[in-house]
């Protein structure tokens, strides 16, 4: 039955033909919605409902739907009818196009003969010969111009540029030379064509199409060659090696040449007297071959392009980004197939406007790369890069590099170029949203607001991060600390600005986010006045319900205004002491010298002792025998202090010299002489070891020994009796235990800080 139906239509039978007849319309129908959404389709179809409405006006009016559900059902039914009609049209046009395939060479030959002047023979070979000669003359002129321009302009530029703007400038000049060379080619070929007289009108059109195609192909291949720079590794900006660059340039040139040939053939056939079905068949087949070639180029170069997109150095990209980059060709393949199907559907439906859907992404990409290169060139020539700073540290190997404003402008330029390329591509699909009052226009306005908010957000963040890095001192090292004894370096801390800036950053960035969100909601038509009122009510509820939170925030604000402590300083708040590591809105964190991190609310702090401001005094006790000459000790201490002040390494660390304070205390076994010196915070621990070492050496040279701790016990009884010996042993043991306990208590107290 099926075979009989096929043969009954006059359609050449065959299994392959039936498959094309049945499957291709189904595939085309899957993307018919895209063709319907295009403005051209909507405008051309607008006349059909108007024509159908005229007879309907004379007929009795049909009863209007009484409910919204009935109206929606009627619209759906109308859409189904329209879709079925479109499918029927596609099916009929496709059958007619495929049926015309066997007679296509004869049809074209007859059409070419009709264009010949009366009494003239076949004009096509002579036209092709004239076009070939004209193009040969044009290519010679292009070659001569390229040779002169490169020697004149490129010879003045450095052959191995060091900076990015130098490379981009070199490539832009090279691109300009290539484009001007293509125009020279066209001009020379046109002049050569005009010399030939007596050409038929369509022969003239044929030669002009050949010249235009050659100019387009030459211009685009020159641009591709300059963008990828296959033979210029020193000027290459993209992350390709020499082999990948040459292969990719060759493949793209083949695609561009084929695309220009397809465009030229379609333009040439448009003037011949052939049927629309034959013309549509040629266009569909040629564009299909172009799609297959582009897919092959994408698959063959997928890895090289993916590695060029990823950053060559630095931290590895996230998994999702790597997956997108390494599978970019899948998205391109889906787009190409969709664009080819939509173009084919629109050709069969008789709707123009989809000729550039297949090949448009490539020239758009080239144009976007050129615009971004110009933007980077202008930015780098007009703005100097700020000194490199790193988060937390001042060395590249210890922190993440902080961006500067030039990085921000380059990222902004990249986003603008990407958005512009997407807008141009959507325009080809019939989606225009810039300056429109519809939903698309509102989305565009929201994107503009978000983009400007992102620029402000990043600019504030860069300024504050760089200020924090400039104010952040070099990291402290505990080389001078006695860890076993519980001492820890008491850092001088960050500046007051570096302490307040993180909180200021939080408030500013939060304000920018809130403002951008409000402006975006306003752009899409949301009334934001109730939101402000609701925010005020919520703020009052939080203020009354969270009294402790308000107390913490206000107390912290006053502590920061009073400059009571800063990040990096060593403080004591009574129960806890340690180095300030972080300050937030309602609390701060202290790192104890033994390691624990304590978080304290500002409202809990009654008093603060800051050990890291201005200067620190270190007092050292010296236990000496009771018969030691204190005046001699004073002179020795003074001499040691003078030697330390003259020391090249440690002299500059003293604010006041080492001096003796005399006899501070006397016990039953020694007298205690105390010495002191004044330094900057954190230096006292380094100098304490040096002072002890120098004093010990000076005392040893002077014959002064340190006193040993002596425990005196009293034993009751007569010596020599058994009771006396037992009492003596017991007293000695008790005294030793007491002495050990006192020593352990003092050590524990010192270790606990």
Image (spheres, helix red, strand yellow):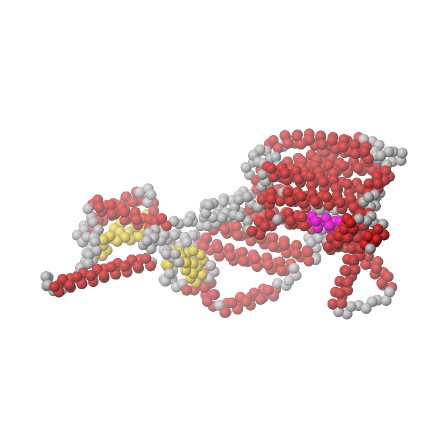
Is residue 41 within the magenta segment? no
Whole-percent x, y for residue 476 in the image:
39, 49
Q: Which residues are drawn in magenta? A: 335-349
Report which quarter residue 570 is drawn in: bottom left
Question: Magenta stretch mostly in which secondary structure?
Answer: helix
Residue 378 visible (yes or no): no
Q: Is residue 688 left or right of residue 509?
A: left
Q: Is residue 461 left or right of residue 112?
A: left
Whole-percent x, y for residue 738 in the image:
23, 61
Q: Is residue 597 left or right of residue 525?
A: left
Numbered label tally: 0
Whole-percent x, y for residue 140 in the image:
71, 30
Is residue 348 within the magenta segment? yes
* Closer to us: 610 or 100: 100
Q: For the point 37% across and 59% down, which residue is it? A: 577
Q: For the point 36% across and 62% down, which residue is it? A: 574
* Quarter the C terminus occupies: bottom left
* Closer to us: 683 or 422: 422
Q: For the point 79% across and 32% down, which residue is it? A: 129
712 in relation to 659, above or below = below
* Quarter the N terminus occupies: bottom right
């Amino acid at each position: 039955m099926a075979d009989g139906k096929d043969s009954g239509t006059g359609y050449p039978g065959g299994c392959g033909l039936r498959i094309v007849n049945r499957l291709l319309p189904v595939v085309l129908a899957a993307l018919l919605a895209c063709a319907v959404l295009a403005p051209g389709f909507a405008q051309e179809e607008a006349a059909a409902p108007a024509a159908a409405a005229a007879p309907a006006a004379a007929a009795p009016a049909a009863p209007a739907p009484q409910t919204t559900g009935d109206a929606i059902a009627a619209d759906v039914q109308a859409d189904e009818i329209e879709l079925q009609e479109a499918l029927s049209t596609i099916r009929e046009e496709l059958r007619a196009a495929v049926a015309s395939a066997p007679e296509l060479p004869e049809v074209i030959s007859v059409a070419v003969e009709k264009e010949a002047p009366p009494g003239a023979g076949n004009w096509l070979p002579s036209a092709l010969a004239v076009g070939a000669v004209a193009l040969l003359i044009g290519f010679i002129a292009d070659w001569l111009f390229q040779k002169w321009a490169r020697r004149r302009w490129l010879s003045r530029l450095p052959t191995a540029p060091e900076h990015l703007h130098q490379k981009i400038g070199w490539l832009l000049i090279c691109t300009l030379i290539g484009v001007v060379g293509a125009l020279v080619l066209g001009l020379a070929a046109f002049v050569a064509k005009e010399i030939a007289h007596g050409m038929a009108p369509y022969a003239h059109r044929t030669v002009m199409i050949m010249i235009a195609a050659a100019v387009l192909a030459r211009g685009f291949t020159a641009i591709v060659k300059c963008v990828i720079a296959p033979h210029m590794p020193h000027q290459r900006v993209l992350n390709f090696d020499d082999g990948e660059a040459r292969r990719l340039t060759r493949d793209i040139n083949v695609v561009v040449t084929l695309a220009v040939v397809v465009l030229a053939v379609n333009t040439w056939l448009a003037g011949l007297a052939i049927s629309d079905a034959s013309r549509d068949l040629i266009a569909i087949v040629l564009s299909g071959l172009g799609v297959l070639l582009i897919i092959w180029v994408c698959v063959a170069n997928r890895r090289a392009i993916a590695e060029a997109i990823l950053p060559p150095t630095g931290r590895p990209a996230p998994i999702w980004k790597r997956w997108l980059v390494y599978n970019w060709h899948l998205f391109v393949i889906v787009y190409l197939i969709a664009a080819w199907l939509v173009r084919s559907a629109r050709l069969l439906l008789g709707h123009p406007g989809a000729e550039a859907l297949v090949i448009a992404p490539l020239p758009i990409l080239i144009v976007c790369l050129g615009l971004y290169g110009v933007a980077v060139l202008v930015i780098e020539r007009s703005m100097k890069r700020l000194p490199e700073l790193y988060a937390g540290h001042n060395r590249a190997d210890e922190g993440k590099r902080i961006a500067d404003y030039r990085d921000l402008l380059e990222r902004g330029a990249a986003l603008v170029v990407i958005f512009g390329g997407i807008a141009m591509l959507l325009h080809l699909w019939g989606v225009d949203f810039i300056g429109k009052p519809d939903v698309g226009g509102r989305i565009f306005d929201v994107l503009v607001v978000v983009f400007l908010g992102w620029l402000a957000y990043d600019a504030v963040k860069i300024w504050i991060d760089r200020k924090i890095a400039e104010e952040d001192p070099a990291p402290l090292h505990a080389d001078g600390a006695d860890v076993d004894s519980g001492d820890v370096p008491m850092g001088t801390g960050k500046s007051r600005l570096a302490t307040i800036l993180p909180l200021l950053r939080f408030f500013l960035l939060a304000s920018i986010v809130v403002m951008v969100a409000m402006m975006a909601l306003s752009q899409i038509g949301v009334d934001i006045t109730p939101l402000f009122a609701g925010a005020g009510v919520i703020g009052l509820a939080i203020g009354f319900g969270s009294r402790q939170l308000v107390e913490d925030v206000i107390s912290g604000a006053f502590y920061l205004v009073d400059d009571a402590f800063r990040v990096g300083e060593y403080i004591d708040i009574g129960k806890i002491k340690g180095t300030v590591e972080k300050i937030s809105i309602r609390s701060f964190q202290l790192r104890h010298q033994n390691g624990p991190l304590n978080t304290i609310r500002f409202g809990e702090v009654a008093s603060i002792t800051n050990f890291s401001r201005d200067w620190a005094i270190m007092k050292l006790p010296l236990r000496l025998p009771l018969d030691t000459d204190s005046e001699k000790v004073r002179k020795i201490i003074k001499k040691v202090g003078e030697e330390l002040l003259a020391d090249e390494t440690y002299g500059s660390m003293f604010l006041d010299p080492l001096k003796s304070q005399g006899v501070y205390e006397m016990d039953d076994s020694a007298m205690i002489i105390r010495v002191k010196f004044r330094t900057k915070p954190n230096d006292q621990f380094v100098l304490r070891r040096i002072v002890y070492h120098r004093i010990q050496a000076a005392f040893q040279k002077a014959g002064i020994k340190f006193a040993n701790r002596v425990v005196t016990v009293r034993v009751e009884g007569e010596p020599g009796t058994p009771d006396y010996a037992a009492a003596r042993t017991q007293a000695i043991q008790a005294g030793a235990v007491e002495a050990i306990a006192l020593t352990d208590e003092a050590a524990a107290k010192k270790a606990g800080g």
